[in-house]
Amino acid sequence: MPAIDPIKFEVIRSALTQATEEMAAALRRSAYSTNVKTRQDFSCAFFDANLRAVAQAFTQPVHLGSFVRHVPFAIREYGVEKLGPGDMILSNDPYGGGVHLNDIALIGPVHYESQVIGYTACLAHHVDVGGGAPASVGAFREVFQEGVIIPRVKLVKGGEINRDVFDLVLAQIRSKRETAGDFRAQIASNRTGAARINEIVDRYGLDQFNLYIDELIEYTARRTAAELQKLPQGEFSAEGFVDNDGFTNDVVTLKVKVTIDDNGVRFDTSGSDKQRRAPVNSTFAQTYSACAYALRALIDKDLPVNDGFYRYVHVDAPEGTVTNCVHPAPVVGGWETHVRLNDLIFLALSDALPEEVCAGTKSMQCHSGFGGLIVPDEPDEQNSSLEYFCFLETLAGGYGARHASDGPDAVQSHGQNTENAPIEETESNYPVRITRYELLPDSEGAGKFRGGLGLRRDYQFPQEVTFTVLADRDRAGPHGLFGGETGSKSVYAIIDNGIETELSSKTTVDLLPGQVISYRTSGGGGYGSPAERDPFQVADDVSNGKISIERARTVYSVVLNPESLLVDETETARLRGLQA
């Protein structure tokens, strides 16, 4: 084997990663929807000619593990021999390595001198894919009700969009203008990646290109194996639940057993509930992604993520369960189950790795989706057709506290990395007013280190819309660790003329002008006993409006002067002594 030049290795490694980062930049700058261009609900990757993951842009961790399942399956099923230069295939098949239908992958071969040397792939969450409710989220019973199912079809041929396929897909979708724009942004992303990969090959030659990809993957495998030696070996288990399935009040039980040994990490979800005719089913790719993320979070952050890492991730998820559903189970809420599984994996490892894992997080995607017809201020008699608008975002919540720090307030949890949808942009582009957007005081799970605060976001509409809540945590808040308390549960409500009615965490409602939908997301779990929290940290939280003076006394046993908000050290010592 030719000698590996360490400098050239690092240059090529960085160039490959940068190629995918440029793909991400091209997609974001070209996209139309707020969900893609602002919230960055997409991911990009490069695979080699052997369909091994080589480089990934770190936009949405939830997508990265699923890509490893989806792209190889799609290419093998479609046939690389049918793909010429400039061709790209489209797919969102949840039972063909995919996830839920909104996440649509576009995959294209990279040709160099008429030879396929790899594949660029980008996946974006499209704001609508048809189905039973605007934004294509809701409590559906079958996958057919959730939107357009796209098998592996050629959207781009020889660099040109196949209008027949394009028009057929768009005909199923409400937000045609935004969706068409986002598809074109994905095409631009793949073209950008292919150009950058060709530049690398131009500079180093195809033999060197392939040699250094092999070495990058083996280098990652060696480092992953070394990182595994730092983890405690053995079997670790936990059990939890999704609060309801959207049609019944029965919890959805999840079980996970984590086995760490010299062969890698095996995640076994046997014992989890059978799949439901309800929006809580995770595809195998979603479950695999949760497990891959959990391992990645426990090892060196500088370690590359490619086939050399993924070969140590082993997942046993029985078919026909909520962690590996089979056709025609609905899958739109599979990410809710996916992210709850993350929490359980870390809970299972908490005794063995008390300083590396956090308490329970919001652990739900927390979808907010709405849509309706755009009603013009002045009707145009010459153009009677009305455009449909759709909007989707996922709301943040409290993160779990850790060994030596509080949980962050109002952030996305675990594999979610989507950004905030700014009020100004949302109100400028959609018929909605965000009347409240604020942290929720007293929502934290109390502890020596407190959980993060949840948030409140209220939507008010000047016209009729259909609104869907697809979330969770309305039964129980995130768990605490080692004496830490549970965070607050979430609340979803409709407010009409000041009268508030709570809603299920998985429901679709038709709203009249002036009505409000209010989200109050859960706080993160606490870590350690609240009685051990530094009284001056408690005072800071009160001063900053994060907890009330009453909660300081009753939960943390800290007495504050009601006017100065300074700690009354004598009364605090007495109170804590009484409760010891």
Image (cartoon, rainbow, N blue to C red):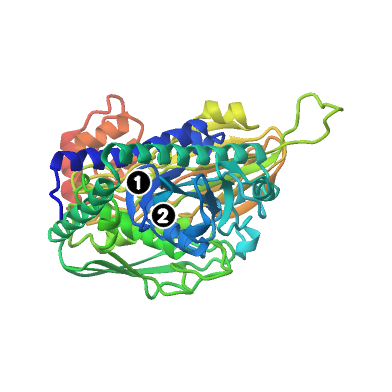
Apparent side of residue 329 relative to residue 375 in the rendered image (left or right)? left
State the mark number for residue 338.
none
Give x and y (percent) for residue 484.
Answer: 26, 53
Apparent side of residue 185 relative to residue 515 in the rendered image (left or right)? left
Which residue is the site of mark 1? 56
Q: Nearer the viewer, residue 43 or 270?
A: 43
Give x and y (percent) for residue 93.
Answer: 54, 60
Which residue is the site of mark 2? 67
Residue 264 drawn above or below residue 109: below
Location of the N terminus by quadrant is bottom left
Label 2 sits on a secondary structure element that is: helix
Residue at image position (32%, 58%) is 292
Residue at image position (61%, 41%) is 179
Quadrant position of residue 427: top right
Work out which residue is located at the far front of the displayed protein and give it.
Answer: 113
**Residue type of the residue flagged with mark 1:** Gln
Whether the residues at callouts 2 and 1 have beta carbons within 8 Å, the answer is yes
Residue 269 drawn above or below residue 16: below
Q: Nearer the viewer, residue 246 or 544?
A: 246
**Residue type of the residue flagged with mark 2:** Phe
Residue at image position (29%, 57%) is 307
Measured in 3D between alpha carbons, the distance from the residue under mark 2 to the one under mark 1, in whole angstroms, is 10 Å
Quadrant position of residue 342: bottom left
Say which label, 2 or 1, has the lower sequence index: 1
Residue at image position (58%, 44%) is 127
Apparent side of residue 130 relative to residue 295 in the rendered image (left or right)? right
Label 1 sits on a secondary structure element that is: strand
Q: How would you rate the neighbour count of disc 1 (Cα within 10 Å): few for under 14, some for 14-19, many for 20 or more?
A: many
Question: Does residue 357 appear in this view?
Answer: no
Give x and y (percent) for residue 24.
Answer: 42, 38
